[in-house]
Each structure stands twice: as structure tokens, then as C-alpha cells.
Image: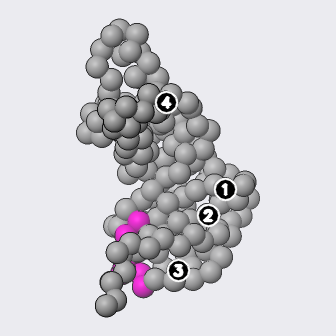
Amino acid sequence: MHRTARLALRVTAGQRRRCFGLLRSAGDVWACALEVNAWRRRRRDVPLVGYQELCRELTASGPVTFAELDSTGARSVMRRFSDAWFAAAKRRSRGDMLAGFPRRRRGLVPVRWYHGTFNLDGRRVRIPTARGTAGLSVRLAREVPYPVEQVRSITLVCEGGRLFLDVTAEVPVTV
């Protein structure tokens, strides 16, 4: 079973700027997926919505296209976009014509990194960034409530102008 804890970040002004830069870059990835599909819709082509197709398009764009956002973070945005599109398609197939496909740009989009791509050491987290940029190490406001070996992913989010890290861990089910 997976559990998620939301932990506030204690960051310097420079770290805050870089974290918001990552979230803005994720918003750019989302907007890019929308723009590509708008072009395809105008040409009456099939939309580009599958996760693998979107990742191929992302890879073709080249490295460091989205500032400091690394490829793992950009792929997490593509996964979110693909899931939103298929959820709307499923609702529409069930007869809900009010279900809308993703068409709105977002300024800040949450970014997720999976096990093995980040480093968690006590209250310090090293968030991966694009190749050729300095690593980003941030401090958590409190200890992670799960053992480090059970942590499976972290998600950088902004809520109410504050930065948080959602830490997801796989915890054993107690009987």
C-alpha cells in the first residue's frame, strides 16, 4: 500500500527561485504538449496522447530544452498529461459529454521523480536537474515519516505560494 506525506520545504531565496523554475518548466512541457496537439488537430491528424509517443516527441526536442528540468521530471509531466487525456476519453465514452480534454495551459505543474533518481538523506533531499546544471539540494521542515528504503517517489508542488514535497512510500499492510 502506498502512503503520501506532504512536507514543507525550508529553502533559501536562490533555492526557491530554482524550485519555482522547475515548476514553470513543467508548465512549459504541458503547454508544449497542448501546442503540438493543437497543430495536429488543425491538420486533422490523430492527437499525440500516448505516454510513449509524448516521450518520443520530448526526446526529439533535445537536451536542456526546458531549462533546469531533467528528462525524468519532464516525463512525469507527460505521464500526467496522458492520464488526463485518457480519463476524459473514458468519461466521454461513457456518455459524459461535459468531460473535457486537456486544453488549458498551467503556469506551475507538479513534478515527480521516482526511486533511484533522487537522493534522500535525513532532512535533506537532492532533486535532480538537467545535465550541465548544478544539483539542487533542499531541506525539509521535518523528518520523513517513512523509512528511507520504503520511499518510492517525491513530487515537488506549490500550494498557496508555498513549496511542498509530497513523499510517497510503499508501506506494508498490517493484518
- Secondary structure under tag 1 reads strand
- Secondary structure under tag 2 reads strand
Q: Between disc 1 and disc 2, whose residue precedes?
A: 1
Q: Nearer the viewer, mark 3 or mark 1?
A: 1
Q: Between disc 4 and disc 2, whose residue precedes?
A: 4
Q: Amino acid at mark 3?
A: Val
Distance, label 3 to label 4, CA atoms, is 40 Å
What residue does disc 1 label? Answer: 159
Distance, label 1 to label 2, CA atoms, is 7 Å
In the displayed structure image, the side of residue 9 where residue 129 appears, left or right: left
Q: Position of residue 91 (x, y in %)?
A: 38, 37
Distance, label 4 to label 1, CA atoms, is 27 Å
Q: Between disc 3 and disc 4, whose residue precedes?
A: 4
Distance, label 3 to label 1, CA atoms, is 19 Å
Q: Nearer the viewer, residue 64 or 37?
A: 37
Contact between marks 4 and 1 (CB within 8 A): the answer is no
Mark seen at residue 164? 2
Q: Between disc 3 and disc 1, whose residue precedes?
A: 3
Contact between marks 3 and 2 (CB within 8 A): the answer is no
Q: Between disc 3 and disc 2, whose residue precedes?
A: 3
Tell me which segment is drawn in magenta. 147-153
Looking at the image, residue 144 lies above or below residue 84:
below
